[in-house]
Amino acid sequence: MSDVADRVKKIVVEHLGVEEDKVTENASFIDDLGADSLDTVELVMAFEEEFGCEIPDDAAEKILTVKDAIDFIEKADS
Amino acid sequence: MRRVVVTGIGAVTPLASGAQNTWQKLLNSQSGIKSIDTFDVSDIPAKIAGLVPRGEGDGLFNAQDHVSIKDMKKMDDFIVYGVAAADQALEDSGWKPETDEDQEATGVLIGSGIGGLPKISESTELVNNGKTRRVSPFFIPSCLINLVSGQVSIKHGLKGPNHAVVTACSTGAHAVGDASRMIMLGDADVMVAGGAEAAVCRLGMAGFAAARALSTGYNDTPTEASRPWDEGRDGFVMGEGAGCVVLEEYEHAKARGAKIYAEVAGYGMSGDAYHITAPAEDGNGGFRSMRNAIRNAGLNPEDVDYVNAHGTSTPLGDEIELGAVKRLFGDHAQKMSMSSTKSATGHLLGAAGAIEAVFSILAIHEGVVPPTLNLRNPSEACTGIDLVPLEAKQRKVNVALSNSFGFGGTNASLVFKAV
């Protein structure tokens, strides 16, 4: 697993207070991990902080799963 | 009118977490006031406060016993304290509404004087430093005063009236009084009512210090700083925490075999129409609020055994209240007891009236009146009344009156009666 994936999952575990093994790549923040719309806003802010990037609102709206987040950040990084 | 009784109590105070834990320390003449070591006070003249003792173990406050880590960031501390005190009061009452009908008959009315000042302060700093994108989506709901009531209702499924009071230092008393009226008028059968406050932060301390309201002469001896009616008093000491009661319609409580602490017998209110921070010099506002509460209870001043005073330890306020009490009670003042528990807890602002309601209820229930700490040299006006100096006193209390007066000239008095 990539370094980005590890860090994304760690943030999700901390911010949503969920078990680590539930945070699979295909897990949806809202449907599988119990987040509400405000939780997802905060999660995106945490990603921005951790990876020093800016995630515009229209891109943030498309980040629905753990994999979406990893893909966006890896793309932004490269 | 329907009768209202108290069937559950909860408190998170600078003395302890838990109403009974707090009460025992209060009766043992312990103080919850200490040096502030959680933030810089080097440039603030008042350097002490009544801080909730945190940790794990009996009597210590552990936020995670009440709020999950995930939810913690959605609440500033005043909400966490309020949720905790409500949890305690509901558990104590044994009332767990599960049917739609019971949930809809149970409401929440918990207020706060100030709300989420620490979070407002932190978030302002972000905005002023160009970090607007770092402002949490939970910032607003973590600060709003009615979110104590909101969070408590969500946690326990309470679907009746959901309300909040904001009347500075009268908040807790107004909340209990207003909630009791909602039950009397049939809006609810059960209400979780109280006040919560956590404004001990740099901004809060600086603000009250600027208003010249705080004690500054006892920074090296914090437990001696809150000394209502004592010659050496020099201002109030900030405190934090929350108090909650479960109020219930009398027949409803009886039918389920609930433990009944006392009856909410009377509630009185008044406005000073005088000054934004100072009480009217003749004590007329406090006088009328006490008189109205006693009249509302259908009692006479002679029926009152114990007064839990507003008594904040300010040079002006303490004697004005005392004067109003003497005027209202006349000769009977010599026969009753009056104390200020702020001497031990500090002034919990919007939560003060709620924890002091709890103390008044316990005075009735347990037949003991809590002490006024540090009252070693009573000022001249204090003759002819028992201010319960230094040590708690056993005495039968049939009727207790609790006073709360707030900035803006808002006054509330509650009368509790043995059932």
Image (cartoon, rainbow, N blue to C red):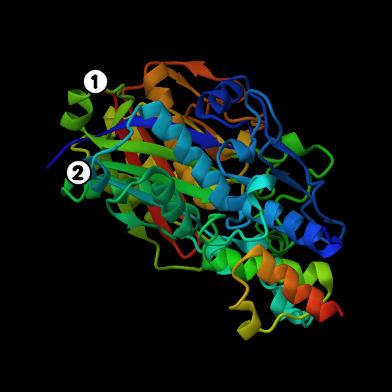
Chain that bears disc 2: B
Disc sitting over residue B326 in the figure: none
Q: Position of residue B228 (x, y in %)?
A: 60, 39
Q: Secondary structure beneath disc 2?
A: helix
Q: Tell which circle, 2 or 1, labels the residue nearer the N-terminal end.
A: 2
Q: Is residue B184 left or right of residue B86?
A: left
Query: x, y percentage for residue B370?
Result: 52, 25
Are dots 2 and 1 on a single chain? yes
Report the quarter where the C terminus of chain A lies: bottom right
Q: Amino acid at mark 2?
A: Glu
Pointer 1 chain: B
Dot 1 surroundings within 10 Å: few (below 14), some, or many (20 or more)?
few
Residue carrying label 2: B101
Residue nearer the viewer, B27 or B375: B27
Q: Residue furthest top?
A: B394
Q: Give the quadrant of the N terminus of chain A.
A: bottom right
Query: Is residue B230 depicted above or below B281 in this figure?
Result: above
Indicate the amino acid at tag 1.
Gly
Give the CA separation, mark 2 to mark 1: 19 Å
| Mark 1 residue element | loop
Q: Are marks 2 and 1 in contact (CB under 8 Å)?
A: no
Q: Quadrant of residue B411?
A: bottom left
Residue B257's disc number:
1
Q: Is residue B239 shown to the viewer in this render?
A: no
State the residue in front, B44 or B65: B65
Evaluate whether residue A65 shows in this view: yes
Mark 2: few/some/many CA within 10 Å (<14, 14-19, 20+): few
Give whichever of B220, B345 is nearer the camera.
B345
- Residue A46 to residue B102: above or below: below
> How many numbered callouts?
2
Q: Residue at x 46, y 52 (%)?
A: B151
